[in-house]
Image (cartoon, rainbow, N blue to C red):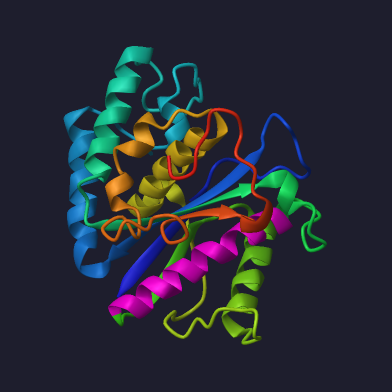
């Protein structure tokens, strides 16, 4: 059995914003037999560096002052060093990574996208499709686990997931390899979601500001890397027909 841990790059915007052109969802696929090893590697990283608390991509930012940040008193140089160490660890874990980077302005041109919740769901579908393809390739079954986002958002998210799983129309992927419904977990208690949070933040940064230093360190774990076909398999630029790359950014970075 495989678990697909999903997280997003911050709150999705409720309308197009030139300052925030992209919204990103990332997923980390971990086989049930490999979960303990992944958990031990992340736990070892925390113990070794005396990090007590939840890991989030934004906590490594030099000016982050969140009171829950376990790196609150670390200098910018130390945060950068720890972040690169974490990225290197992720690059050696027995995982597969999927990410969907959505062009917000292009998404809002669709009649089905009118608010931030629609945008989230618009970005979620390509992730679930690639997870289904992964399960088909391995002849396995899987479960999706995501970070909870508030009671009302969670209710809508579960309903959207259920609709995807049950809709068998010609323009929908079949999800016969997924079992149960959507599982929502507090990220503070989920190693998989914390890894997903980090990789999503790093990939989002690569596209939003053109800094792919961290994402490059775990590119080898993206679905399709061994076959040389990351684009469309481990990385989805959505919507494909009118996705616009910003200045200084490139596909597959």
Residue at position x 71%, y 42% in the image:
13
Quarter of the image with the C terminus in it: top left
Determine the residue positioned at 41% across, 20% down: 72
Residue closer to the observer: 220 or 79: 220
60 vs 220, nearest the viewer: 220
In the rendered image, is residue 249 in sight? yes
**Which secondary structure class fits the magenta region best?**
helix
Q: Is residue 66 above or below residue 34?
A: above
Q: Measured from the top left, where is residue 183 in percent x and y?
A: 48, 67
Decide: is 244 above or below 52. Answer: below
Q: Is residue 9 magenta?
A: no
Decide if residue 34 is on the left or right side of residue 219. Answer: left
Q: In this rendering, would 175 be left or right of 88?
A: right
Answer yes or no: is residue 151 visible: no
Task: Please name the residue shown 33% across and 77% down the image.
Answer: 137
Residue numbers of the magenta segment:
118-138
Residue 246: x %, y % from top left: 61, 34
Q: Does the magenta-highlighted stretch encompass residue 129?
A: yes
Q: Closest to the observer: 153 or 9?
A: 9
Give coordinates of residue 34: x percent, y percent.
Answer: 20, 62
Q: Decide if residue 141 is on the left or right side of residue 48.
A: right
Relative image position of residue 214 (x, y in whole percent): 35, 33
**Which of the 4 image quarters holds residue 71?**
top left
- How many callouts does the rendering have? 0
Q: Is residue 200 above or below residue 118?
A: above
Q: Is residue 106 above or below residue 81?
A: below
Quarter location, residue 70: top left
Residue 100 vs residue 86, the one in the foreground: 100
Quadrant location, the N terminus: bottom left
């Amino acid at each position: 059995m495989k678990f697909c841990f999903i997280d997003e790059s911050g709150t999705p915007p409720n309308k197009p914003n030139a300052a925030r052109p992209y919204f990103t969802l990332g997923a980390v696929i971990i086989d049930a037999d490999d979960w303990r090893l992944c958990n031990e590697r992340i736990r070892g990283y925390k113990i070794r560096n005396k990090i007590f608390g939840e890991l989030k991509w934004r906590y490594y930012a030099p000016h982050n002052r969140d009171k829950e940040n376990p790196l609150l008193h670390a200098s910018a140089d130390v945060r950068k060093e720890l972040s690169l160490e974490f990225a290197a660890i992720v690059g050696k874990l027995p995982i597969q990574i999927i990410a969907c980077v959505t062009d917000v302005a292009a998404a809002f041109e669709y009649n089905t996208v009118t608010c931030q919740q629609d945008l989230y769901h618009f970005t979620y579908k390509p992730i679930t499709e690639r997870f289904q393809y992964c399960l088909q390739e391995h002849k396995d079954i899987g479960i999706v686990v995501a970070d909870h986002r508030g009671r009302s958002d969670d209710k809508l998210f579960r309903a959207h997931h259920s609709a995807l799983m049950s809709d068998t129309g010609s323009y929908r992927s079949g999800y016969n390899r997924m079992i149960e419904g959507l599982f929502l977990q507090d990220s503070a208690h989920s190693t998989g979601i914390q890894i997903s949070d980090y990789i999503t933040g790093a990939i989002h940064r690569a596209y939003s500001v053109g800094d792919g230093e961290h994402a490059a360190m775990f590119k080898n774990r993206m679905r399709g890397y061994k076959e040389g076909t990351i684009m469309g398999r481990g990385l989805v630029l959505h919507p494909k027909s009118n996705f616009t790359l910003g200045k200084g950014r490139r596909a597959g970075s």
